[in-house]
Each structure stands twice: as structure tokens, then as C-alpha cells.
Amino acid sequence: MPLRMGRMAASPFAFLRGAAAVMAWDLSHTAVTAMQVIIDGDAHINNFGLYGTPQGDVVVDLNDFDEATIGPWEWDLKRLVASVNVAARENGFNSKERSRAVRKTVAGYRFNMDRLSTMGVLEVYSIYGYAERRPTFVKVPAQAWAVIQKTVGKAKRTTNETLLPKVAFRNTDGAWRFRDDPPILTREGGETRRKVIASLAAYAAQLNPAYRNMLRRYAVADVAHRVVGVGSVGTRAYLILLFGNGDHDPLFLQVKEAIEPVHAAYLPELGLRQEHEHQGLRVIDTQRLLQALGDPLLGRTTIDGRPYFVRQMKNMKASMPVSLMTGKPFDFWASICGGLLARAHARCGDAARIAGYCGDADTLDRALADFAEAYADQTERDHAALVKAIKTGRVKAVAEDGGE
């Protein structure tokens, strides 16, 4: 937890990323419509990114579902616009530019929700966001397209093979081992290692038969505990290194603890508690609902009575360089995130009703721009309070290198 506090203290945006529970409480005290969907629960701008399909294509979509549950669609959109405003502040945007970026985000949501509301259900489920193909239904600024294509190139270079030498080494006995890099990466041995490896049996049993058979051809080389993200710091997350057809065929699987989503406390009658008593099952089911193309190795398991979900660690994943983006590229990416969020909601909600509420005018855009500006102000105050608490010793925080 001191590492989590250290990461959240880095900036107001880092604070916002780690404060999903804080925003859940705030949103629970706001007015909502009666329209419920599967919400991502943590749809900030950095939780949209690129990843690879089994066919080798690079697609763009939501990519974090730890907090997903059933709830008001507005909560996702409000978290997204708040994150756009906070990120824009850190990139040097003035108030007018921040308002423009948020309005672009909401306009992207409205536009795509309206477009999807006229399509057949099967068609909505068949739409994928290929990052390598310029979309035809919206104008893409040249600068924005250049940034996206550069990120596509990075995604294609981010594979199991490229990750291997960064986190592991071949021991003198010929075996591959993770490099200890505490507190971020710590090798696991003994009983914990045995339990993590044993949990793969229950995980594999639920996979598609073809992938279950594929997994049998891999053997475990090592296990480590790896701290990831900001909001996930404090939960158990293991990284497993496996090899298939020789040293050139590594596979990294992440086994991540799944806990109750932060919004569940405020949605007791609408949560997924009865249907998904196993929180790992909740995560993978909601991911399959919200994401157009998912990880074929996505599954669940249990260790010491605690629920986990399992996924590939590196399958051509890359994040957009949001902290380096300004002007049209930033605005365009924000609008794309709004459109992707609409597509996710349309897969499991009433797109026509939501589109009707959003309307054709920019009324919702302007209202949420005001909300985002106010919430960003509050986020900066909250971040300042955390930094002060760390300086006075009331909250303990450590840096990435383990220093206080």
C-alpha cells in the first residue's frame, strides 16, 4: 500500500487513476437515468489502448475490467470526461482547451451511440476497431493518425519474445528465471509457487478445447509476484513464465486477484453478486461483453479461496502516449475513447434509449464539460491533501526504488 500511495502522489492524474473507489462514492450521490448497462467502472482515458488478436491484427478498445459491473451508463462517461480534463491540465491545456477536449469526448459518445442505435444487434457485436485501418465514418486528423500508427508499431514490437530478456535470464543450470526487482517484481518459491502453478489446472479446464490443448504444450519455468498499475496495487498479481517449442517460444500469463468492484457497494440490487459469486468470473464475463475482440486465453481460477482471473501478459499491447499529446491528436483520441465507450455500452444496453437521452444538440457535451472541470478541481485538491499527508508522516509512501 505504501507503493500505491507513492504512485498516486505522483500527479493529480495518477491520483485519479488510483481513486476509483473515491469517485464511485461521489457518483453514487449524483442523479442518474434509469438506464443500466454493463459499465467498465474505471473507464479513464488511459484504460483504452491497443492489443493484438490471435490473427495478428492490432485493435483498439477498452482494456481494463477489474471494476466492471451493472450500473448507470453515465458513471462510465463521467469518469472518462473527468480523466480527459485532468490529463489535459497536465498537458498544459487552458480551460477553453480542456472544455473543447471534453466536449469532443462526449460528442464521440453521442455520435457512435446514435450510429449504433440504427444497426442490427448482430452488426453491433461484429464491429471491431482495427487500429491499422483509417475509419471511414469519421475524419481523422493527419497528426492523430501518425500518433496512432506509431503506437501500432510499438504494439507489434511488444510480444512475449521481446519481454523475455527484460524480466528474465537464463541461469547457469540452463533454466530461465525472473529477475528480482523488488518491490515491483519478486520471485515466488515454495508453497506459493506450487499453489500458483496448481491453479492452472482449474483455469485450463474452462478454456476452449483448442486453447486447452495448446496450453498443454507449455511448461512452467518460473513464477513471480508483479505489482501492476495504480488502482491494482495492493492486490495479488502473479506472473508465470512458460515455454513451448524452445526458448524462442515464451508465454507470459498474469494471474490477478479479483475483488468486489468499487461500485458494488452502491448498487446492491443491481450488482452481479448472485450470478458472479466468483469475482474472477465477473471480470472475464464483463470483458467478453464489453470488448469486441478478447483474449482467447482469458479465464479464471482460485488460490487459497481467493478468486483470480488469468490473461496473457503481453499480446501486442500498447498505450497511447496521452501525456505527450496536445491539440488535435489529444482531442481526436478523446473522441475515439468516447466512441469506444458507446460501442461497449451498446453491446449490452438499449442504444436507442441512451441515444435519445443524449440528443442531437451539444447540451450534454456542455454539461459534462462543466462537470469535468469541477471534478478536476476537486481531484487536484484531493491530490494536494494526499501529498501533504505523506510529507507530515500521516500516510506512508514509497517510491518505485523502495525508498520513502
Image: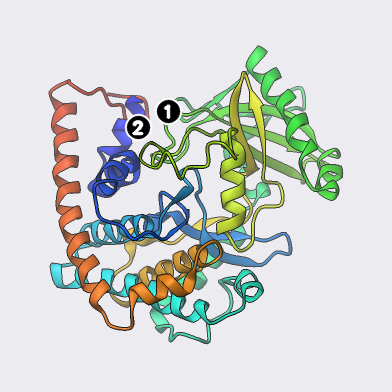
Q: Amino acid at mark 2?
A: Arg
User: Do tag 2 and tag 1 residues touch (Cβ < 8 Å)?
Assistant: yes
Query: Callout 1: few (<14), some (14-19), or many (20+) C-alpha neighbours within 10 Å?
Result: some
In-image side of 232 versus 300 (left or right): left
Q: Residues within 10 Å of mark 2 (few under 14, many from 20)?
A: many
Q: Name the disc covering residue 4, or none.
A: 2
- Res 101 quadrant in image: bottom left
Q: Secondary structure at mark 2?
A: helix
Residue 154: image location, x then y, percent: 54, 61
- Please give left or right for residue 48 compared with residue 248 in the image: left
Could you tell me if residue 150 is visible in this image?
Answer: yes
Residue drawn at x 55%, y 67% is: 152
- Residue 108 in view here: no
Q: Answer above or below: position of 35 versus 377.
A: below
**Residue tagged by mark 1?**
234
**397 or 18, which lies in front?**
18
Does residue 354 appear left or right of residue 349 in this picture?
Answer: left
93 sits left or right of 170 in the view: left
Which is more toward the observer, 89 or 382? Answer: 382
Where residue 257 sits, quadrant-wise, is top right
Q: Earlier in the sequence, mark 2 or mark 1?
A: 2
* Circle count: 2
Q: Position of residue 180 (x, y in %)?
A: 54, 25
Q: Residue at x 32, y 55 (%)?
A: 79
Q: Amino acid at mark 1?
A: Gly
Badge number at residue 197: none
Query: Which quadrant, please, contains the C terminus?
Result: top left
